[in-house]
Amino acid sequence: MIRPPARPAPAGAVYFSLLGPLTAVRDGRPLPLGPRKQRLVLATLLARPNTPVPVDVLTDAVWPDGPPRTARKNLQVYVSAARALLGSDSRDGRDRVVHGCGGYRLTIDEGELDTLRFRSLARAGRAAGERGDLRTAARLLREALDLWEGPPLNDLRDSTGVAEEAERLEARCLTVYEDWAETEIELGRAAVAVDGLRDLVERHPLRERLRVAWMNSLHQSGRQAEALAVYDDYRQLLARELGLEPSPAMAALYRAMLGRGRTARPSAAGREAAHGTALPAAPRDFTGRREELRELLALLGSPDERVVVVSGPAGSGKSALALRAAHLLGDGFPDGRFHVQVRREDGSARTPAEVLGELGRLCGVRVPGGSGVPAESAVTAASAVPTDSAVPADATVPAVSPGAADAWQRWLSLHRALIVLDDVPDEAFVRGLLPRSGPSSVVLTARGQLAGLAPVHRIALGALADGEALELLGKLIGPGRLRTDPAAALRIVRACGALPLAVGVGGMRLAVLRHLPLAEYADRLGDPSAALDELVAGDISVRLRMASGWQDLSADDRRALGRLAGPAQEGGFTLDGAMEALGCGERAAIRTVESLIDAGAVTSPAGEVTAHAALYEVPRLLCLYAREREEG
């Protein structure tokens, strides 16, 4: 049976449920949803409400083994059926499913879809818990859980695409259940959670947070022997299945229970510390990058991917993407998520020993000499790099002692943690920090490609699409102001090279200078001699960020980029254009351009083309900075 939404939908509206089998009701009556392929399309659209769903995603969900020749036409039929089922939007009379450049977008309200209502209740419950209002938190979280009818979309999970969406939904439900159980334990009502936790642990035996809550609920209910047995069973399961030990936080809880002390649920701050979370705040204005974020989340959720490199030019939003993913992946890394900035405020790189020392402090692992090893000490890559890496065996990693590297590798091999190393200067810096084995994952952000690391998965970021850049600008200056002159707004984001940093700085400047017409600011940014002067907001300067990236380049690459900035600014350059600007032959030009690609200063086509056919580009603002240096 489908429970009605807490906020009733308008009369005649359809209410959909994904937290169980896919179902729909109108005015309390079940609705037929059509044949299986039609339901797969509807489920995929509903799983990503109010967000464009690419046609390729829908195609893969319906035909995982390969689409037929008529797939696109068939999709249009299934989408038409969804439109008929949903009806028009009561607010403006428009279709609820529309097609745009990003794919099909289904517009739906919280009162019409259980997953949106679930998310709203969970958010409100967590906010109440953070305020210390535990009774309200427990009530709201329980209301959210009452929408959960069983494994989400359990009737369509034979489709790989739908199964992935269903697993994400189930992970959210499990997290809310853990939040609710911990809140009830802290309120002294542990007994209400015991049976449900036992059932979930049976279905998800390796989920440590569920185990901890079950242990605590049993212990608070006076069932100490059973609580201790939960730990022993889990320790044996981990050793047998993964060769690991329970986390230090769970082991400490076990020792406390052995001492017969009643252990209440820790506070939110204590709980975060126990889980080892050390992340900056999630980026508030994160915009776009939906496919890249989805890819990064999938990679980090796979046991086969231990290292992911997120690369792109200065200001492309690499750090924001990595942090967004890290904040969304708390359940997948029970031993913590840690962020370390590899550079100092002035843009210079710290030593690997300093970074390793900070990691040791964050993770609670003693790394001998990890924070003060002389720069001349080194450990060979053979003892610090995964054995399947293509790095030469005699390569060296400066400033990491063998003892520190070994201690760090032992910790990584025994824990499932997520490490974000932000703004890495080169491959040598991180070789001794990457996991050789074990379930931990590392995300590296870097301007360059870090081509010397293998095997790793790479995600390259470029400029935002126009629509995404405008969305970001609108978040900062307000959608109403954006609508006053959309053409000028588009000129602004394009003059910023559609880089998130530059668009963000421009938006912050306009938010302060509310009298400034968008068209006038667009004119200022369009002037090559003034653009970088305009992209300053308080202590944030796009020019300073470009300068930091410039210093990372070799002297030869800086000279070459200065000469290529002119033709690059005219819409890109070909190999022939590079030969002319550099005054060299074909082989030398290819080596120079590819060196700049490796450094992240030049972008090349995504598909395979010959060197002569390729059109190479340099981000507009980097072009402007390079020309400043060349002329200065």
Image: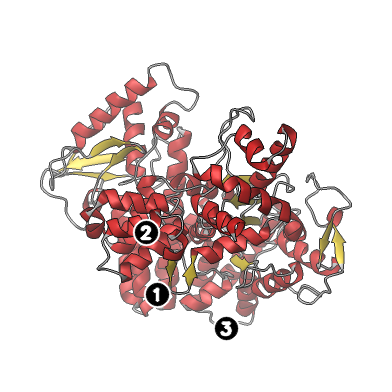
Residue 475, numbered circle: none
Q: Is residue 88 left or right of residue 346?
A: left
Measure the C-alpha gap from mark 3 to mark 1.
Answer: 17 Å
Q: How is the image coloured?
A: secondary structure
Camera-nearest residue between 227 and 496? 496
The number of numbered badges drawn on the structure is: 3
Judge whether 611 appears above or below 488 on screen: above
What SS does tag 3 mark? loop
Q: Residue at x 54, y 49 (%)?
A: 296
- Which residue position holds label 2? 524
Residue 419: give x, y in percent of width and height. Answer: 63, 61
Q: Residue at x 62, y 51 (%)?
A: 562
The mark that comes first in sequence, 3 or 1, is: 1
Quadrant in which the C terminus appears: bottom right
Judge whether 398 appears above or below 291 on screen: below
- Which residue position holds label 3? 261
- Which residue position holds label 1? 189
The mark that comes first in sequence, 3 or 2, is: 3
Q: Residues within 10 Å of mark 1 (few under 14, many from 20)?
A: some
